[in-house]
């Protein structure tokens, strides 16, 4: 596995802690999923035999939500973490058309495991671990693996355009955690924004930079449809 062993995600305890507490420290997580589901239903409505690729699937929660929209779709879930992929397998054990691939982004860029294109490609809170050059390469990869009329959606953290806004958004995030987290975790979770900022695994780029990357990759209808501080839902379509 490439570039996983030096990451927190290779640590089983870390990945389990993330799954246990994600709802407590990811602001408006349900809204992020609901917007993704809406985009899927809106842009994929009327397409037959819909196929989905989730890049950095984590525990499979987003794909589970998409299965609620279309239980007959086929989903391929990719993640570098064996623990996350196993959690996704358990979550989606009732869905026969869910396929799982253990690979890093670097590996799928270097040795593409997919030949057939997809209708809908998503990624959630994963691409910010790539540097700018590899983000651009992954956006190009997503474009090349979409069917005509398909859509790519990225739910991720982004870097604020100025240090003043960055500090304000991190304070907004911390305030959200304090106001919404499980009271049993209120001593440990408020430090999450600081840990995110200090973690060298995180390499966020600004929203505008990534929107321009998507346009250069060939996407149309490129935009951000939701933003809460540094958390954003953005993407584009592959027009016919």
Image (tube, rainbow, N blue to C red):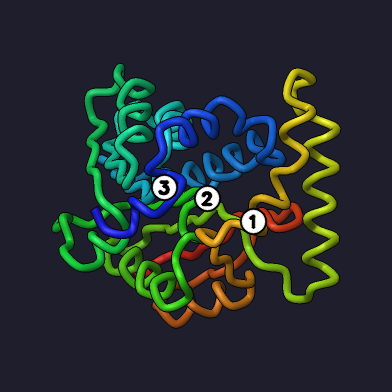
Please name the residue that numbered disc 3 is placed on. 44
Above or below, 7 relative to 163: above
What's the distance in space between the residues labelled 2 and 1, CA to CA? 10 Å
Residue in front for this viewpoint, 220 or 158: 158
Q: Earlier in the sequence, mark 3 or mark 1?
A: 3
Q: Is residue 233 above or below residue 180?
A: below
Query: Up-down: is 7 above or below 236?
Result: above
Mark sitting on residue 125: 2
Question: Left of 207 or right of it: where is 73?
Answer: left
The relative height of residue 23 versus residue 50 in the rendered view (above or below) is above
Q: Of the two numbered discs 2 and 1 on the same chain, state the one appearing first in sequence.
A: 2
Label 1 crowd bin: few (<14), some (14–19), many (20+), radius 10 Å: many
Q: Badge 1 is on which residue? A: 232
| Numbered disc 3: secondary structure | helix
Q: Position of residue 72 (x, y in %)?
A: 30, 29
Could you say which is closer to the camera, residue 166 or residue 42? 166
Seen from the viewer's position, the closer of residues 228 and 234 is 228
Where residue 235 appears, x then y in whole percent?
52, 62
Relative placement, left or right, of 165 versus 101 is: right
Q: Residue at x 34, y 24 (%)?
A: 92
CA gap between label 3 and label 1 equals: 21 Å
Q: Residue at x 81, y 40 (%)?
A: 176
Tell me if residue 50 can be seen.
no
């Amino acid at each position: 596995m490439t570039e996983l062993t030096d990451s927190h995600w290779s640590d089983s305890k870390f990945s389990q802690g993330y799954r246990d507490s994600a709802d407590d420290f990811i602001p408006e997580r349900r809204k992020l999923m609901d917007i993704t589901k809406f985009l899927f239903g809106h842009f994929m409505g009327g397409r037959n035999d819909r196929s989905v690729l989730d890049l950095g699937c984590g525990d499979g929660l987003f794909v589970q939500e998409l299965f609620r929209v279309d239980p007959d779709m086929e989903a391929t879930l990719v993640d570098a973490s064996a623990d996350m992929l196993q959690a996704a397998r358990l979550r989606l054990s009732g869905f026969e058309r869910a396929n799982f691939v253990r690979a890093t982004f670097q590996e799928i860029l270097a040795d593409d495991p997919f030949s057939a294109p997809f209708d809908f490609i998503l990624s959630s809170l994963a691409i910010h671990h790539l540097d700018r050059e590899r983000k651009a390469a992954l956006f190009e990869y997503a474009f090349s693996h979409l069917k005509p009329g398909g859509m790519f959606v990225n739910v991720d953290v982004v870097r604020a355009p100025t240090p003043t806004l960055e500090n304000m958004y991190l304070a907004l995030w911390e305030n959200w955690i304090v106001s919404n987290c499980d009271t049993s975790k209120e001593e440990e979770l408020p430090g999450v924004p600081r840990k995110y900022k200090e973690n060298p695994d995180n390499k966020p780029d600004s929203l505008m930079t990534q929107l321009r990357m998507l346009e250069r990759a060939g996407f149309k209808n490129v935009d951000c449809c939701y933003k809460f501080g540094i958390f954003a839902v953005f993407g584009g379509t592959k027009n016919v």
